[in-house]
Image (spheres, helix red, strand yellow):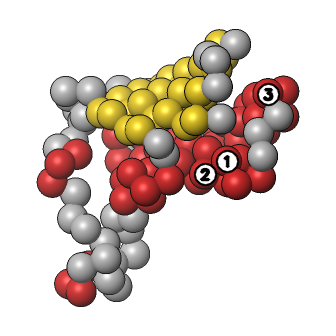
Amino acid sequence: MNRKISIGSKVENLRIVETAIDEVTSQIGINQDNYGKIMVCTMEAVNNAVVHGNKSIESKNVEIVISYIKDSLEISVRDEGPGFKFDSVPDPTRTENIENVSGRGVFLMRRLADKIEFNEEGNMVTMSFKI
C-alpha cells in the first residue's frame, strides 16, 4: 500500500493528514499503542514542515508519503524549506530547555518511531514503525 498526500502550508490542513493516518491504520489493523506513536510522530513532522520548514507560506506544499510493506509502516514528510541541522536540535529534557514552549517534536519522533532518518538538507524526515 502506498499513499501520497500534498497539502498547502496551513495548520488547518493537518486534519487532512490525520484523516489519512486514521484510514491507513484502520485498513492494516494497527493496535492502539502503535496508532498513538504513528499519529504523534506524523503530526509533529507535518506541523514542523508547515510552521518551521515552509514558514506557513500557503503556496508552499508539504508532501507526505505513507507506505506499508510487510509489517512495516514508513512515513516520509518533505517541505519546501531550506532544511535545518537536525543534529543540533537542543535536548528538551535538559534543565535550560525544560520551560521552552517548542523544541519537543524531533525529540518525540526519535523516541516513538522505530527508525528515523533526515535527508542531507534537513527538509525531509522518514519515520519507520514495525507493525
Q: Quadrant of residue 24?
A: top right
Position of the C terminus, as image quadrant, is top right
Q: CA distance from mark 3 to mark 1?
A: 12 Å
Q: CA distance from mark 1 to mark 2?
A: 5 Å
14 is higher (above) or lower (below) than 2: below
Label number found at residue 28: 3
86 lies left or right of 70: left
Assess whether mark 3 and mark 2 are in contact (beta carbons under 8 angstroms). no
119 lies left or right of 1: left
Mark nearer the N terminus (2 vs 3): 3
Whether residue 42 is visible to the viewer of this picture, yes or no, is yes
- Picture residue at 38% right of the left edge, 38% below the top: 116
Q: Position of residue 75 (x, y in %)?
A: 53, 29
Q: CA distance from mark 2 to mark 3?
A: 15 Å
Label number found at residue 34: 1
Label number found at residue 4: none
Name which residue type carries label 2.
Lys
